Image: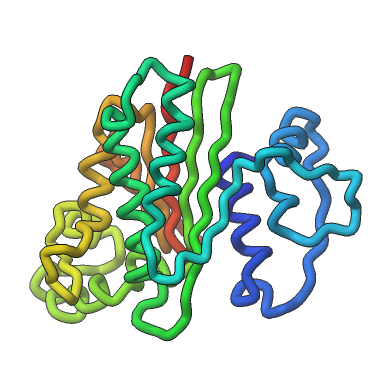
Amino acid sequence: MTPESIAALAACIASDKFTNGMSSRGNIPSNPSIAMMFRQSGFFDHVSILDYDSGRSKGAKLIHKRSDKKVESSDAKNICRRLISKTDYTYIDELEPMYVILIEAMQNTNNHASAGKPDQYDWWLYQYEDPEKKLLHYTFLDIGVGVFESLPVRDFKRKFMELFSIKNNSDLVRPLLKGEIKSRTLQPNRGKGIPQIYDQSFDDLFEEFHILSNDILINTRKKSHIRLSNQFYGTLYYWSVKIN
């Protein structure tokens, strides 16, 4: 049980597309420290529970948004403002890399999570503070089709699979991060998506940065990735920031 898994669990249980309208049952972790993190995460604010003694969080850190095809810039700014009080940074402009990442992640959910279908996917954001390690953990995710099943990537595979000897999604990581896979619109006012997120992740603000989508897990700061044996249907960004 980790901060990013709590966010993914909440997103799945709250989605009819995932549960097919069926109810779910479960219990909180037996480990006391992990159970405390679970209770304080805001998880219970986003699901229906029978046992109200499990406790709901005050000032929940788990944020759920149906974005209605809009980028919520005010949410991104508020998240950056909260971070200032925990760090040596003074001005919100100093946190521009994180602001850009949040905006681009929202934009990606709006533009690509449904792969051109009429379905609409929400995004989730979870902030968890680890006082022992002096870290703030952030998780942003949607449970759409995933980066490697989005229309731009599927178009790229269809056009260049033989030319670039593309065997699986692992072969698409480099062109994806380098911006060689273009959006269909090619409009200059559109966001730069994953390549922009990748570039910003190298800022000294971040201790670590990962992107999980479909069967690929990318560690951006180590410039490495692995191909997983299981699929994650959606896109999840996970990073941490050092705090005082």
Of residue 106 and residue 151, the one placed in the foreground of this image is 106
**Could you tell whether 226 is left or right of 82 in the image?**
left
Asked if 51 appears above or below 207 in the picture, the reply is below
Q: Residue at x 14, y 79 (%)?
A: 159
Q: Residue at x 46, y 50 (%)?
A: 140
Viewer can see residue 217: no
Q: Residue at x 66, y 65 (%)?
A: 14
Viewer can see residue 157: yes
Q: How is the image coloured?
A: rainbow
Of residue 163 and residue 235, the one placed in the foreground of this image is 235
Q: Residue extending furthest left?
A: 163
Q: Residue extending furthest bottom?
A: 118
**Could you tell whether 163 is left or right of 94 in the image?**
left
Of residue 141 and residue 191, the one placed in the foreground of this image is 191
Q: How many marks?
A: 0
State the quadrant of the N terminus: top right
Q: Quadrant of residue 214?
A: bottom left
Q: Picture coordinates of residue 63 (x, y %)? A: 57, 50
Q: Picture coordinates of residue 185 (x, y %)? A: 17, 75
Q: Picture coordinates of residue 84 (x, y %)? A: 42, 25
Q: Residue at x 52, y 18 (%)?
A: 134
Q: Quadrant of residue 205?
A: top left
Of residue 154 and residue 225, the one placed in the foreground of this image is 154
**Could you tell whether 113 is left or right of 28 in the image?**
left
Q: Picture coordinates of residue 225 (x, y %)? A: 32, 47
